[in-house]
Amino acid sequence: MVAKNRKKFNLNKKNILKWFYIFLSTTIFIILLISCFNIFQKRIDNEKELEAVNQELDNLIKQRDLLNFTLGETYSEEYLERVAREDLNMQKPGEIVYIIKKESSEMVNEEEKEYNFFEKIINWIQGLPE
């Protein structure tokens, strides 16, 4: 018979500790890799949220500036006089105010809307010359 030279796997304390340390370090490396990936994802999400918040902040600053300008305008005498004349229908002493009413096309459209489809057809037929 031919004798095979096999190296026997020796399960002594050194080999067990060596394999335990390899397994432990691999497990720790995988956990750290997963943690780094999660932190990277959270960072990307936070950057997107920060960008949205900064954009909202810019919009609010513009709105605040507009409101401050409007507020400053409301304290002016010209604005108060315009509101008194237009909204409150006030006038200066000795002044005569003429109000010109405009014909609105909305009233004409409302009259047309009152007729349904069949009434419009009947009105059209009645309007035809005989």
Image: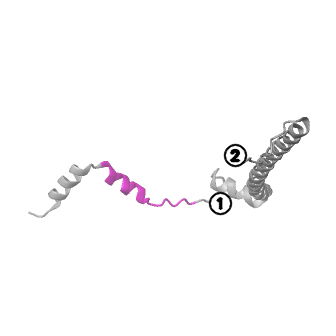
Q: Mark 1: which amino acid?
A: Glu
Q: Mark 2: which amino acid?
A: Met
Residue occupied by mark 1: 95
Q: Mark 1: which secondary structure?
A: loop
**Residue drawn at (84%, 36%) of the image:** 11
**Magenta segment, which residues?**
98-114
CA neighbours of label 1 inside 10 A, class few (<14), some (14 to 19), many (20+): few
* Residue that lies at the very extreme toward the right in this rendered image: 14
- From the top left corner, tell me how far across and down residue 58 is, in percent: 77, 58
- Which residue occupies the foreground of this view, 103 or 40? 40
Above or below 79: residue 33: above
Tally of numbered tags: 2
CA neighbours of label 2 inside 10 A, class few (<14), some (14 to 19), many (20+): few
- Which of the labelled discs sits on residue 51, or is there none? none
Q: In which quarter of the image is the C terminus?
A: bottom left
Q: In which quarter of the image is residue 99?
A: bottom right
- From the top left corner, tell me how far across and down residue 30 is, in percent: 79, 46
- Which residue occupies the foreground of this view, 98 or 72? 72
Real-space CA distance between mark 2 and mark 1, rounded to the nearest whole angstrom: 134 Å
- Which residue occupies the foreground of this view, 73 or 65? 65
Residue occupied by mark 2: 1
* Residue that lies at the very extreme toward the bottom in this rendered image: 129
| Residue 74 appears anywhere in the view | no
* The stretch drawn in magenta includes residue 41: no
**Residue drawn at (56%, 60%) of the image:** 98
